[in-house]
Image (cartoon, rainbow, N blue to C red):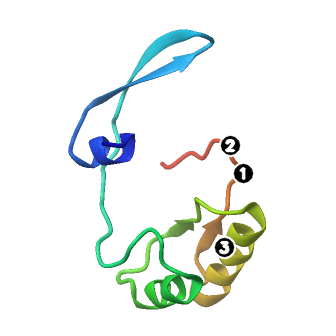
C-alpha cells in the first residue's frame, strides 16, 4: 500500500532517501483518519464536510490539488470557520505542534 496507508496502520518508522542516502525517521505523531468521504470528492462535498465536522479542528491544512485551487479553498475555509487555514506550497515544512 501507500506510505499514508502504512502510517494509518501503525508503522513507527519510515525510510526516505535524502541526498542519495537512505534515512530512517521515527513517526511520533498521533494519527487520526477521517472517514465518510472519498479523497476524490468535489469542492461542494468538501464545503459540506467543513460545515459539518465537529468538533472543528484548530486549523485546517489543505493539501493535494492545484496551488490556485488549494489557496482559494483555504481562504473559503477560513471565512467559513474563522479557524486558521493553510495551503502550503509543495515541499514546504509545517510545524504541527
The residue at 54%/87% (across/down) is 47
Q: Residue at x 44, y 72 (%)?
A: 57
Mark drawn on residue 92: 2
For the N terminus, the image quarter is top left
39, 50: nearer the viewer: 39
- Tell me the crowding category of disc 1: few under 14, some 14 to 19, or many 20 or more residues within 10 angstroms, Cα based: few
Residue 80 appears left or right of 49: right
User: Is 48 on the left or on the right of 36, as rendered?
Assistant: right
Q: Which residue is mark 3?
A: 74
Q: Secondary structure at mark 3?
A: helix
Q: Which residue occupies 36% across, 81% down?
A: 55
Mark 1 highlights which residue?
Answer: 89
**SS class, disc 2:** loop
Number of marks: 3
**Percent from the top left, x then y, of residue 35?**
29, 72
**Quick one: which residue is furthest to the left in this view?**
9
Q: In which image quadrant can residue 62 be found? A: bottom right
Amino acid at each position: 500500500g501507500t506510505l499514508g496507508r502504512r502510517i494509518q496502520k501503525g508503522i513507527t518508522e519510515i525510510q526516505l532517501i535524502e541526498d542519495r542516502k537512505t534515512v530512517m525517521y521515527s513517526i511520533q505523531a498521533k494519527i487520526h483518519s477521517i472517514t465518510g468521504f472519498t479523497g476524490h470528492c468535489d469542492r461542494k462535498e468538501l464545503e459540506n464536510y467543513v460545515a459539518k465536522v465537529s468538533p472543528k479542528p484548530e486549523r485546517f491544512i489543505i493539501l493535494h490539488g492545484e496551488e490556485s485551487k488549494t489557496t482559494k479553498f483555504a481562504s473559503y475555509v477560513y471565512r467559513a470557520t474563522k479557524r486558521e487555514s493553510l495551503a502550503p506550497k509543495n515541499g514546504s515544512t509545517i510545524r504541527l505542534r
